[in-house]
Amino acid sequence: MRMILAIGAVILFVGCAGEYSASWPAQSLATAANESEPRRTQAPTTQALASATRLEYVVSPPTQTDFDVLEVVLTDLLASAQFHGYHATGAPKTQIVLDLHTIQYPYPLDGMQELVDRMEDKGLRLADDLAMDFIRRSFGSISLGDYSPRNRNILVEDVESAVPQGRFGIELEFPKVFPSAKGWVRTRLPGYSADGRYAYVECGLHPAAHGASGYFMLRKENGQWTVFWRRVSYRK
């Protein structure tokens, strides 16, 4: 099954439902037009598939492929101006911290259609097989302790243990413990297409006064993962 990108302007700012966002393709439209983009099945088929397919959570250690995908996402966030992070006063913020455990709360097993619809509203059409895999793997609090980043600017830390909350909470105390870090990320494990060529990642971004999320679609070409669609959303 395939998915199709709904690409608008190169940078699109949307203000709705108490949220403002930025989304943009990671490569030129000319390049994208020269290849066959994946397409998602139509909504009725998706609904029927979600009803007929019994999903179960898959709880297993992250794979090296997961770590490869997450490294690309984290490197992208570190370089992206769309992830605001902490304001650099003096020395630049050159690091990013990945929380040791994945997001605690899983997607509901019957939430496939909701996920597909929500992402289509954001400008991305998820293939059914990829959406199902993402939900199956969303069971929370999986340790990422075996991840050894090749990028030395990526740190893997148990943020709640490393940062004393004090009277001001983690977000205000974090820069005292990690003064060179732009911020920290708590992620879900990636979901993959059946052919293994596409990966989808959702993560929570900090600092953010009212919460922020990052959404990423990656493609594997010549053995390398690259981001070709991303969206960062800050809640107001």
Image (cartoon, grey):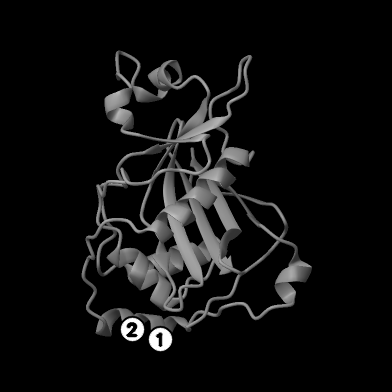
Q: Position of residue 49 (x, y in %)?
A: 33, 83
Q: Position of residue 143 (x, y in %)?
A: 27, 46
Task: Describe the element under mark 2 as helix, strand or loop.
Answer: helix
- The amino acid pointed to by label 1 is Thr
Q: Nearer the viewer, residue 65 or 211?
A: 65
Classed neighbour count for the residue bearing mark 1: other residues with Cα under 10 Å, few (<14), some (14–19), many (≥20): few
Q: Residue at x 40, y 77 (%)?
A: 129
- 82 left or right of 139? right
- 113 left or right of 231? left
- The amino acid pointed to by label 2 is Leu
Q: Is residue 120 above or below residue 234?
A: below
Q: Position of residue 180 (x, y in %)?
A: 53, 23
Figure label count = 2
- 203 left or right of 38? left
Q: Which residue is mark 2?
A: 49
Q: Nearer the viewer, residue 25 or 61?
A: 61
Question: CA gap, disc 2 to disc 1?
Answer: 6 Å
Q: Which residue is mark 1?
A: 45
Looking at the image, do the residues carrying marks 2 and 1 touch, with CB atoms under 8 Å apart?
yes
Q: Quadrant of residue 27?
A: bottom right
Q: Quadrant of residue 60?
A: bottom left
Q: Is residue 201 above or below residue 50?
A: above
Q: Nearer the viewer, residue 126 or 140?
A: 140
Task: Describe the element under mark 1 as helix, strand or loop.
Answer: helix
Classed neighbour count for the residue bearing mark 2: other residues with Cα under 10 Å, few (<14), some (14–19), many (≥20): some
